[in-house]
């Protein structure tokens, strides 16, 4: 079985961001980066968001996990080791750590609202970099 399940999409991607959520229960950001069972990847735009793919993690290999996240703009998790954090940052992925479990749906709504109003500088930078 392939580690990634892609979902077909009609999204053009302009002004959008790709975000991955480390999850063990498929509904919450509830996993450590290194022990997540999967990463649910969403494309988020001002108009909404959609599930782009589900990346299943089959082994606890940081390099393989980082490689599977190629093309992701932001990754969310509840914890991460310093080596893994350095590797994702070096790949141009912005890490966001939560201290407690948070609903993926709740975070998606926040991100969509942010894109529609005044996104923080790091998100503006991601969008500008993609447009260049």
Image (cartoon, rainbow, N blue to C red):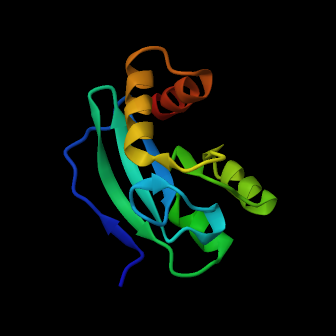
Asked whether residue 109 is in view, the answer is yes
Name which residue lies at 61% across and 71% down.
35
Where's residue 94, x and y in %?
Answer: 62, 43
Q: Quadrant of residue 46?
A: top left
**In screen coordinates, is 24 left or right of 14?**
right
**In screen coordinates, is 86 left or right of 131?**
right
Name which residue lies at 76% across and 61% down.
81
Q: Residue furthest right?
A: 82
Where is 46 relative to 91, above or below?
A: above
Quick one: 98 or 74, which is closer to the camera?
A: 98
Q: Residue furthest front?
A: 100
Quick one: 67 or 111, which is closer to the camera?
A: 111
Where's residue 17, x and y in %?
Answer: 43, 38
Name which residue lies at 72% across and 61% down.
84
Quadrant for the N terminus, please: bottom left
**In screen coordinates, is 63 left or right of 6?**
right
Where's residue 21, x and y in %?
Answer: 49, 53
Where is 45 relative to 84, above or below?
A: above
Where's residue 75, x and y in %?
Answer: 56, 49
Asked whether residue 71 is in view, the answer is no
């Amino acid at each position: 079985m392939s580690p990634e399940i892609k979902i077909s999409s009609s999204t053009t991607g302009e002004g959008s961001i790709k975000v991955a959520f480390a999850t063990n229960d498929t509904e919450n950001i509830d996993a450590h980066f290194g022990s997540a069972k999967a990463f649910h990847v969403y494309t988020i735009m001002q108009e909404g968001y959609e599930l782009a793919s589900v990346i299943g993690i089959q082994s606890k290999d940081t390099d393989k996990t980082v490689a599977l996240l190629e093309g992701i703009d932001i990754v969310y998790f509840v914890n991460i080791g310093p080596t893994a954090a350095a590797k994702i940052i070096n790949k141009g992925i912005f890490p966001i750590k939560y201290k407690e479990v948070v609903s993926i749906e709740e975070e998606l709504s926040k991100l969509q609202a942010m894109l529609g109003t005044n996104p923080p500088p790091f998100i503006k930078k991601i969008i500008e970099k993609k447009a260049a």
